[in-house]
Amino acid sequence: MKGYKFVSVEFTEDPNVAGRTYWYLCEFDTADIGSRVTAPIGSHNRLQTAVVRRVMYAEAPYAPYPLSTIKKIEGILAENL
């Protein structure tokens, strides 16, 4: 078993967080490096477009961020399908 799928994303269109990456839990098999996705960001959880920069599979104890608080990818943009 591969475990959970996690993706590190960059919000390239948001100058406030440009150059930073954030980890998310991803339930979409088709998300891969370079995919454009929508994900909630900040305490307001506003959905923004992001680009997947890294993909990893891990069991809960080895997750890049605690499963109890990690946010999830909400969708994949149609251009990736």
Image (cartoon, rainbow, N blue to C red):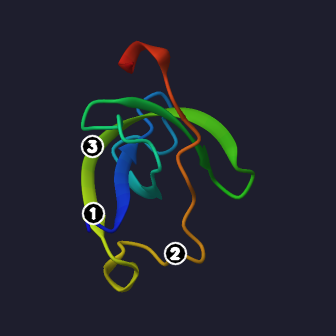
Name the residue tied to disc 3: 53
Q: Which residue occupies 31% across, 81% down?
A: 62
User: 47 or 43: nearer the eye?
Assistant: 47
- Residue 20 visible in the shown view: no
Q: Quadrant of residue 65?
A: bottom left
Is tag 3's residue or tag 2's residue first in the polypeptide sequence? 3
Is tag 1's residue or tag 2's residue first in the polypeptide sequence? 1
Name the residue tied to disc 2: 67
Give amino acid for label 1.
Tyr
Residue 16 at x, y percent in the picture:
52, 42
Quick one: SS at disc 1?
A: strand
Quick one: SS at disc 3?
A: strand
User: How would you rate the neighbour count of disc 3 (Cα within 10 Å): few for under 14, some for 14-19, many for 20 or more?
Assistant: some
Q: Report if the CB atoms under discs 1 and 2 are less than 8 Å apart.
A: no
Q: Disc 3 versus disc 1: distance between alpha carbons?
A: 14 Å
Name the residue tied to disc 1: 57
In which quadrant will I find the N terminus?
bottom left
Q: Which residue occupies 47% across, 33% down?
A: 37
